[in-house]
Amino acid sequence: MKRCPVCQAGFKDTPECRRCKSDLTDLIALENRAEYIIIQAMQHLKAGNISRARQLCNHSETLQRTEFGAALLGFLDVLAYEEKISAEDMLWQKN
Ligand SMILES: [Zn+2]
């Protein structure tokens, strides 16, 4: 969060907006949760579990949309599509 969602004042990583005094504790917690989940998604990607990585990335993006999350989700979509095509090719070759 770069700006307070209430008054748009610059944000300084404190739970209270310096200008309007809004309590941003829950939003900060949500942002931290989204970051934690996207890190989990990257660990599943590293382990080759594309499906789980996509699930987690999607979840993270529902909590907080980021350019990185959107790019990662696009990348995971391509990998999942290629994985599906490859699995279909293998089935085709068996028959
Ligand atoms: Zn504010």
Image: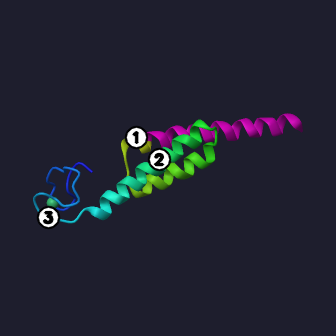
Tell me the residue at 52%/37% (across/down). 75
User: Is mark 2 in CB contact (under 8 Å) with mark 1?
Assistant: yes
The three-letter code of the residue at mark 3 reads Lys
Residue 17 is situated, as x and y percent measured from the top left of the image, at 16, 59
Q: Quadrant of residue 89?
A: top right
SS under mark 2: helix
What residue sits right under mark 1 in the picture? 68
Q: Specify few, some or many for label 1: CA neighbours under 10 Å numbering under 14, 14-19, or 20 or more.
A: few
* Residue at the extreme front: 14
In what quadrant does ligand 1 lie? Answer: bottom left
Which of discs 3 and 1 lies nearer the camera? The answer is: 3
Q: Residue at image x 76%, y 40%? A: 88
Which label number is shown at residue 38?
Answer: 2
Name the secondary structure under disc 3: loop
Q: Amino acid at mark 2?
A: Ile
Q: Which residue is mark 3?
A: 21
Residue occupying the point 48% across, 44% down: 39
Residue 77 seen anywhere in this rendered image of the structure = no
Image quarter where the C terminus lies is top right
| Magenta highlight: main SS | helix
Outermost residue, left side: 19
Question: Residue 40 appears at what percent x and percent y?
Answer: 52, 47
Task: Write the start and end of the magenta stretch as one range.
Answer: 71-95
Does mark 3 have its CB less than 8 Å from ligand 1?
yes
